[in-house]
């Protein structure tokens, strides 16, 4: 059917037969809940999506988990029997973040977060995601790249009409989250959420957010910046476009004081108070 309400599970580790989600009967499929592609009993029996035509669209409102797609799989890609790339989009709303975990490599499909100016998506990557297809975000939607890497053939992140910006969440420290393309990047004003992983960072450094190998179009500007810590995070609050890289300039972290330090400070304050009372 064109609409499927609830969860969808394709394949089973207990079943060695090759199984797939066939979209040849309609142009659009809507999964209201979670969508899971399981790994079969052998490397060549992983579940996958078969797009019936180049413009077939599959929308997922819940978590998307693909545990298949090993390097030796007979279906490393989400195939399109009609040619083209198809579209896999996440449109579960702007509320609770949904997880997207895709284990396979070799993808050529198009991806999107959100569906339109009024139908949003809010996803967090659980694994690196790489495709030679396009990656699009719609205004009001949110992507949490965490400390992972999103790679696409092109990045379409310029939808911010009416001041309803999209949001990028990024984790930095020993490993930094990154959104990258060998092609073109379109980007307008966006909101940024920063999370520090609590490891190491050279204060005052520029934080790499995007890389592109083609052409940049749009407006380089920030809406709101949210610093989630741990500790206190500050930045210059400005973006730099240099050599195909877009940075947030001058990021610094002031760590939270340790419990031991707080105890020592409290003890020192107590001793000063006692000495003052004795003198009085």
Image: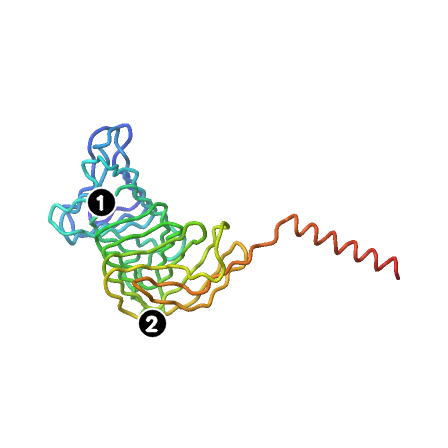
**Which element is circle 1 on?**
loop
Outermost residue on the left side: it is 82
Query: Looking at the image, which residue is at 30% across and 44% down?
Result: 102
Give the image location of residue 221, x and y in percent. 37, 70
Can you tell which mark lies on residue 69? none
Instruction: Using a 10 Å C-alpha cutoff, classify the residue at mark 1 as few (fewer than 14 neighbours), some (14 to 19) or many (20 or more).
Output: some
| Dot placed on the residue nearer the N-terminal end, 1 or 2 | 1
Query: Looking at the image, which residue is at 26% across and 41% down?
Result: 104
Q: As drawn, is 211 to the left or to the right of 261?
A: left
The chosen color scheme is: rainbow
Asked whether the residues under the numbered discs 1 and 2 touch, taking CB atoms below 8 Å apart as contact, a structural biologist would say no
Instruction: Using a 10 Å C-alpha cutoff, classify the residue at mark 2 as few (fewer than 14 neighbours), some (14 to 19) or many (20 or more).
Output: few
Query: Looking at the image, which residue is at 29% across and 70% down?
Result: 218
Query: Looking at the image, which residue is at 22% across and 52% down?
Result: 132
Q: As drawn, is 114 to the left or to the right of 80?
A: right
Give the image location of residue 151, x and y in percent. 28, 52
**Which element is circle 2 on?**
helix
Count of numbered circles on the image: 2
Depth check: give the residue in front, 48 or 207.
207
Q: CA distance from mark 1 to mark 2?
A: 37 Å
Name the residue beneath numbered marker 1. Answer: 106
Depth check: give the residue in front, 39 or 264.
264
Give the image location of residue 121, x and y in percent. 33, 56
Name the residue beneath numbered marker 2. Answer: 162
Q: As drawn, is 243 to the left or to the right of 237?
A: left
Q: Nearer the viewer, mark 1 or mark 2?
A: 1
Image quadrant in which you'd find residue 65 = top left
Depth check: give the residue in front, 271 or 35.
271
Give the image location of residue 210, x and y in percent. 33, 59
In which quadrant of the rendered image does the C terminus lie? bottom right
Q: As drawn, is 3 to the left or to the right of 24?
A: right
């Amino acid at each position: 059917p064109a609409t499927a309400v609830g969860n969808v599970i394709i394949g089973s580790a207990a079943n060695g037969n090759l199984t797939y989600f066939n979209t040849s009967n309609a142009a659009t499929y809507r999964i209201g809940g979670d969508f899971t592609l399981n790994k079969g009993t052998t490397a060549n029996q992983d579940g996958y999506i078969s797009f019936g035509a180049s413009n077939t669209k599959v929308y997922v409102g819940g978590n998307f988990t693909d545990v298949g797609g090993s390097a030796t799989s007979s279906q490393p890609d989400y195939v399109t029997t009609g040619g083209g790339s198809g579209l896999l989009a996440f449109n579960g709303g702007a509320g609770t973040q949904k997880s997207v975990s895709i284990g396979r490599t070799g993808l050529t499909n198009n991806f999107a977060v959100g569906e339109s100016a009024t139908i949003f998506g809010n996803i967090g990557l659980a694994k690196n995601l790489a495709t030679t297809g396009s990656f699009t975000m719609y205004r009001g939607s949110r992507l949490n790249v965490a400390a992972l890497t999103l790679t696409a053939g092109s990045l379409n992140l310029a939808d911010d009409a009416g001041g309803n910006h999209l949001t990028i969440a990024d984790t930095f420290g020993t490993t930094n989250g990154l959104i990258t393309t060998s092609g073109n990047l379109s980007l307008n004003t966006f909101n940024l959420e920063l999370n520090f992983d609590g490891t190491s960072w050279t204060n005052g450094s520029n934080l790499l957010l995007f890389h592109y190998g083609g052409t940049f179009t749009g407006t380089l500007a920030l809406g709101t910046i949210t610093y989630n810590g741990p500790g206190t995070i500050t930045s210059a609050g400005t973006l730099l476009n240099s050599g195909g890289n877009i940075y947030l300039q001058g990021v610094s972290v002031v760590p939270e004081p340790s419990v031991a330090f707080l105890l020592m400070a409290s003890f020192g304050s107590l001793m000063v108070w006692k000495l003052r009372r004795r003198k009085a």
